[in-house]
C-alpha cells in the first residue's frame, strides 16, 4: 500500500524488508511492538549485531 495513503487513512505502515534471516527471526517479536517504527529499530539493531563493521 502507498505510504501516503496509509498516513492519510491513519493506518499502520508496512515494514521494510531487510535480510531474510533477520525478517524471519524478528517476525516472532512483531506483536510486541505497537508501532512499526519501533519494530524496524529492533530489526536494525539485530542486523547491526550480526553484521561486520570496521572499527574506527
Image (cartoon, rainbow, N blue to C red):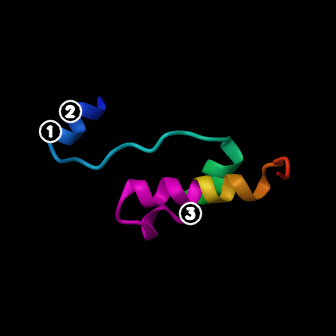
Q: What residue span does the magenta drawing correspond to?
A: 29-43
N-terminal label among 1 and 3: 1
Q: Secondary structure at mark 2?
A: helix
Which residue has dot 1 on it? Answer: 8
- What distance separates the C-alpha of mark 3 from that of mark 2? 27 Å
x 83%, y 48%: residue: 52
Q: Quadrant of residue 32?
A: bottom left
- What distance separates the C-alpha of mark 1 from that of mark 3? 29 Å
- The disc placed on residue 5 is 2
Asked if labels 2 and 1 touch by Cβ distance under 8 angstroms, the answer is yes
Asked if labels 3 and 1 touch by Cβ distance under 8 angstroms, the answer is no
Tell me where residue 13 appears, x and y as whole percent.
33, 45
Taking the view exactly as shown, the residue that stands out farthest to the front is 56
Tell me where residue 6 appears, x and y as whole percent.
23, 39
Q: Quadrant of residue 25?
A: bottom right
- The answer to whether 1 is drawn above or below residue 7 in the figure is above
Q: Secondary structure at mark 3?
A: loop
Work out whether residue 51 or residue 2 is closer to the camera in this orientation and state it: 51
Q: Secondary structure at mark 1?
A: helix
Taking the view exactly as shown, the residue that stands out farthest to the bottom is 32
Judged left or right of residue 53, residue 45 is left
Dominant SS in magenta: helix
- The disc placed on residue 28 is 3
x 14%, y 42%: residue: 9
Is residue 54 in the magenta section?
no
Q: Quadrant of residue 8?
A: top left
- The answer to whether 56 is drawn above or below residue 16 in the figure is below
x 23%, y 32%: residue: 4
User: Which quarter of the rendering shows the N terminus?
Assistant: top left
Q: Nearer the viewer, mark 3 or mark 2?
A: 2
Amino acid at each position: 500500500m502507498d505510504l501516503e495513503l496509509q498516513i492519510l487513512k491513519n493506518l499502520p505502515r508496512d515494514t521494510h524488508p531487510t535480510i531474510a534471516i533477520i525478517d524471519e527471526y524478528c517476525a516472532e517479536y512483531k506483536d510486541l511492538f505497537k508501532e512499526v517504527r519501533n519494530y524496524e529499530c529492533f530489526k536494525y539493531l539485530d542486523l547491526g549485531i550480526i553484521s561486520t563493521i570496521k572499527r574506527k
